[in-house]
Amino acid sequence: ARSLVRPCHCVPTMSALAPSHFLAARAPVWASSDRRSPKARGAVNTTPRAAASAAGPSFLSAVEQAPPDPILGVSVAFRECTDPNKLNLGVGAYRTEELKPYVLEVVRTAEKMMLEAEYDKEYLPMQGLAEFNVATTELLLGKESLAVKEGRVATVQSLSGTGSLRVGAAFIAKFLPGTAVYLPSPTWGNHKNIFADSGVEWKEYKYYNPATIGLDLEGMLADINAAPSGSVFILHGCAHNPTGVDPTMEQWHQIADAIQAKGHVPFFDVAYQGFASGNLEEDAASVRLFADRGIEFFCAQSYSKNLGLYAERVGAINAVLNDAASAKTTLSQMNRIARAMYSNPPVHGARIAATVIGDPTLFARWNEEMGEMAGRIKTVRKMLYDDLTKVNPDKDWSFVTRQIGMFSFTGLNPAQVENMTNKHAIYMTKDGRISLAGLSQAKCEYLASAIDDSFKSVE
């Protein structure tokens, strides 16, 4: 493979780094050695002159303005809104019943333990924190996993789910050139950017059926069978984003059959393990099914949601393979990719995760806290369903409770979403997704009325 390391000839000299006004801005000589004023000494005026205006347009003047992020842009608009009833259901971040950010108890405890241990701040290896990598692999696949015991898993700590996907995308671009990646339609908005910016062609496969607001299993299986053998398929391990529509275990078996028959490469995106159902084992069932069947796959993990470590950027990219030798060489190349991207990952969040997972008391409490968070979301989901049924009993709202995780895919179209925002000050993504993690019990009735109004008054 061609080396990614190229010699750099762009290191500037000190003179190049210094601003043009550097010398002019220094204090005049008389201020430190000669106490007479410049006028008394007959000195020239040392006041800096205004910098000359730039000549001609910038060499970057042809760069186009990037479109606003469809998810993060919602929060910007929400902050600027002055309506007292405003509601932010755009960003997928957990909130308390008071709609405040929540730091898990186990995270606070782990940080105290880490402070007492007086850890240093040295660089991590390219692969990341060893204790974290062991913990995250076992959490994903189970401690009794044969793949783990036989050393058939290559794991690199990366920058949450996004960074893990990006490392995996770069690996595909380099070692599976020309291979297309198939994304579910719809999918998380950043998936397309990640693969496109890595130089990997992406296509879509059928996943969601708008008529039933459920899974289009028939269409999904047909697209899996129609794709060229050896294609990569992105699969949401649990709590599909944005729809909240997950296959049943029986359907997962059918999906695994189709992928295995065509020799495709699954690439799981697991961003909600333990946070979707409140149970770590249940939320990892799809991934473990593929591992137990001997299907090789990639898997990106994130600890933003289940540990609430949004700003710490904690995650991992895993390759679960058929032999230890391939896992070793794959690990070496994933390390090399990470080295060129960001050198090595941050330690603080990884150490929190490793501490919580590795301490039996903290691990048990973490499971309780995940259950509490998932339970609050299930409660407002049920309340929203009840309130929707009250305001419009003629419409079937059962999809709200059939969906799982922090999101609900409402079926609202972009024009109806615009009505939600402009008329009701409810901020959400234009595809009709709402984050139930940002909904309180007190706001359920208000949201239900707004949704019903938008369906009725806007086509």
Image (cartoon, rainbow, N blue to C red):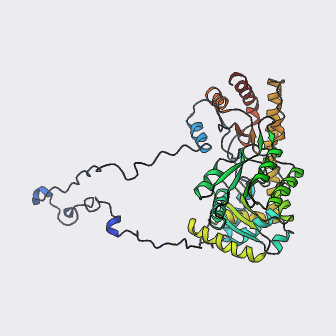
Relative to 439, does residue 15 appear above or below in the rendering? Answer: below
Relative to 283, does residue 439 appear above or below in the rendering? Answer: above
Image quadrant for the N terminus?
A: bottom right
Q: Is residue 300 left or right of residue 77?
A: right
Residue 297 image position (x, y, % from top left): 76, 63
Residue 173 visible to the viewer: yes
Of 66 and 422, nearer the camera is 66
Of 97 and 155, nearer the camera is 155
Residue 59 image position (x, y, % from top left): 37, 53
In percent of the image, x 32 and y 60: which residue is there? 19
- The number of discs equals 0
In percent of the image, x 55 and y 36: which residue is there? 80
Relative to 410, does residue 321 appear above or below in the rendering? Answer: below
Q: Is residue 171 left or right of residue 30?
A: right
Relative to 127, does residue 180 appear above or below in the rendering? Answer: above
Residue 119 visible to the viewer: no
The image quarter containing residue 122 is bottom right
Q: Kindly give the residue lying farthest to the bottom in the view shown.
A: 325
The image quarter containing residue 426 is top right
Image quadrant for the C terminus?
A: top right
Of 232 and 428, nearer the camera is 232
The image quarter containing residue 159 is bottom right
Q: Kindly give the residue lying farthest to the top in the view shown.
A: 457
Of 451 and 185, nearer the camera is 185
Residue 85 image position (x, y, % from top left): 65, 30
Residue 54 image position (x, y, % from top left): 30, 50
